[in-house]
Amino acid sequence: MVENGTPKHIAIIMDGNGRWAQKRLLPRALGHQAGVKAVRKIVEHCVKNGIEVLTLFAFSSENWRRPKEEVSLLMALFIKTLQKEIDTLDKNGVRMRFIGDRTAFPELLRETMVAGEAQTKNNTALTLVIAANYGGHWDMCQAFQSVIEKMAAGELNKQAITPQLIDEHLSTAGLPEPDLFIRTGGEQRVSNFLLWQLAYTELYFTTTLWPDFDQISLNDAINSFKSRQRRFGHTGEQITNKPD
């Protein structure tokens, strides 16, 4: 069997911060803080191992349904973490990119996002995509709205609408589709994350809670990816016999 190489783009749902804290009889806030430390380890590991894009689901459009106190804490932690980490990410060649609807966020958070993207825009070691107030349904809707607006203006006709055109109007435009999707915490669903982009992505689920997900855990996921045969509609024989 032909094995895959290292994935270019890894997308992760970082699940289990609250349960990690509850298991230790700690406030959920400490679970989210522990989750930030896990992010730092995984970003560093991706830089060292030549991963081109890492997309992290930081806050979904459905997370507003959580208790107001927890949402406020998450917003404060988000701002504090970005302000603290931007310089370090910049020094390590990490380019930041945010996807999602920013309009509901506090002004300071929106300003911090813009500043982080601007400061790191020329970096090439890793593109770190943070999905915040993001949902796959939202992403497709805003892409379709943009296409419809262009059609109404006479810039496009219906024959021009192709999957490639839709790709160009998604929030992830210009990025490769994820090769490997990881979800921690034991749940086995994609939860409205990158619905269009995950069409041919390899899925990997683990019971490890996000704060405990480390470099070894990531290597396990990557090794699982490498052992799989990605056929993209071909037969296994076609892939095996494909010339190098």
Image (tube, helix red, strand yellow):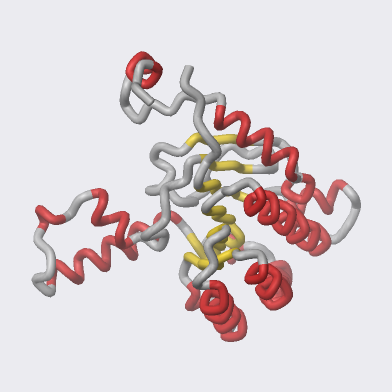
Question: Residue visible at 51% across and 25% down?
Answer: 3
Residue 68 visible in the picture: no
Q: Position of residue 234 (x, y in %)?
A: 32, 23
Q: Position of residue 48 (x, y in %)?
A: 66, 50
Taking depth in this image into account, of 104 and 41 the one nearest to the observer is 41
Residue lying at the far front of the rendered structure: 244
At 25% from the left edge and 49% from the top edge, which residue is drawn? 163
Q: Is residue 218 left or right of residue 202?
A: right
Name the quadrant containing residue 60.
bottom right
Quadrant in which residue 184 is drawn: top right
Q: Position of residue 88 (x, y in %)?
A: 70, 70
Vertical side of 234 occupied by 116: above or below: below
Horizontally, residue 55 falls left or right of residue 233, namely right
Q: Tell which of 128 and 11 is nearer to you.
A: 128
* Closer-to-camera residue (63/214): 214
Q: Write the residue at 18% across / 70% down.
A: 150
Residue 15 in view: yes
Count the labels in the image.
0
Residue 91: x and y in percent read 66, 70
Q: Nearer the viewer, residue 80 or 87?
A: 87
